[in-house]
Amino acid sequence: MPRALEREEGCWAWAVLLASMLIQGLTLGFPTCTGVFFTELQHDFQASNSETSWFPSILTAVLHAGGPLCSILVGRFGCRWTVMLGGLLASLGMVTSSFSRTLSQLYITAGLITGLGMCFGFQSSITVLGYYFTRRRALANALASVGVSLGIMLWPLLSRYLLEDLGWRGTFLIFGGVLLHCCVCGAVMRPVATTVAPETKEGLPPPPKTPGPGTLAACSQTIQRHLAFDILRHNPGYRVYTLGVMWMILGFPLPHVFLVPYAVRHGVDENRAALLISIIGFSNIFLRPVAGLVASRQNFASHRKYLFTLAVLLNGLTNLVCTASADFRVLVGYCLVYSVSMSALLALGLVYQTSLEALVSKEFSRQISGESCLGGMSGSSEWPLERFLVDATGNFNCVFYMSSFFLISAALFMGGSFCALQKKEKQGRPAEAEGAFTEAAGEQCLTLEGTDSSEKRLCREIM
């Protein structure tokens, strides 16, 4: 009996939206709680700041850089099975990490395996929304992003509570069971009925007689295709956006990881320090959907890229507040202002919204994978570098200075490049219009060969 497929914008689409919201909370929200375990991991393994920081660095890098592999799995098996595989890998990584005896084992289990599983989960959950929603895509993306805010709010609180009673090993074991819920969410993502008719065997082209490319060349073509290099080559706006995001990623995640150790270093209680990250997540629950809905209005369509640039600039300037004072009340105010800029930044395009709005559904998976992979590679070594600076200087202020530098410079680069592209586009339009007019006039002259001399003379003047 043939399997029934779900319809776009149908009732089941909202169940898929809820599942995507939970998956994004379980995966994208998880790295924000890694700062809670820094002190415990350092004491247990007798490691330095830079050595310990490789754990969240590898986790986040693989979470983003595993995009091409996720794109291949989505194209081969679909979003449903890819999400369920990701849930199994993420759970397996956290369970085995609770038995780690060295930091190297922790890098492989909690970093590589868990990061790869989270990558499969969150990228597939974003891709499936493009298949289920067309008219309400902006609303679906805004509501799904609430899951990230919930994860940012709840993961640090849960980590702090379990750490006091069970230690980091027992906490990681519990986290393995929590991440297993991604499999349940993935089972909800049924295939969607497409409007494109399947190709018949009669319409297929004959197989080529020439031998195909070698294995190395085929792998290179596959990697380039799933990294969306063709889109980068032919779309200047997307190229500027991708390069800006790659540079911005070097500084954007740093406050989430270093805010808790920074507050503890300056005398803030550990529970209150963990509460700072939860304040950011709680504020984003309300701010991010509003920012997404406002940004998706047609009134802002032509200015959306500049609003995104402005949000990046504001986010970079906000990080300088921490360098002025480490008082708890000042840090609470910083978290609130940071939440506003972060909500606008993410709603306007950090992960998918700005760059996906002009692409068809079949491009979603590989475009997301290419963007995430490039961003993951750019930020893979940033946290160990920051930890090395902290070890060398003994001052956490360098973290926020460097974060502000990357964000502000990325905003200036994108803003200047977008203005230059828009100016070039405006200069190209009159030339295209003049060329079209000349071509039309020439065609009209060709039709006047049998007319009198006055009409021919007028035609030559027009030419």
Image (tube, rainbow, N blue to C red):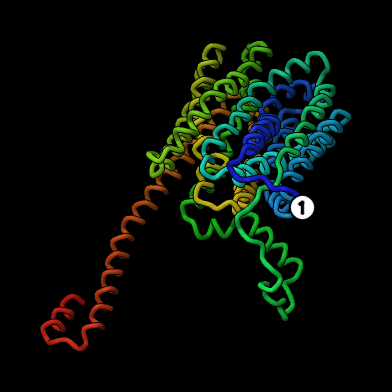
Residue type marked 1: Pro
Q: Which residue is mark 1?
A: 2
In x, y percent, where is residue 254?
A: 60, 31
Q: Residue at x 66, y 40 (%)?
A: 125
Q: Residue at left 60%, top 27%?
A: 149
The answer to whether residue 378 shows anywhere in this view is no
- Along the viewing direction, whichever of 202 and 154 lies nearer the viewer: 202
Residue 240 lies, with reference to residue 234, above or below; the image says above
Q: Which residue occupies the extreme bottom position in the image?
A: 450
45, 415: nearer the viewer: 415
Specify whether 457 is left or right of 218: left
- In the displayed image of the protein, which residue is found farthest to the left? 454
Secondary structure of the residue carrying tag 1 is: loop
Residue 343 vs 211, above or below: the answer is above
Asked if 200 appears above or below 19 in the picture, the reply is: below
* 269 relative position to 440: left or right: right
Question: In the orientation shown, which residue stands out farthest toward the front?
Answer: 1
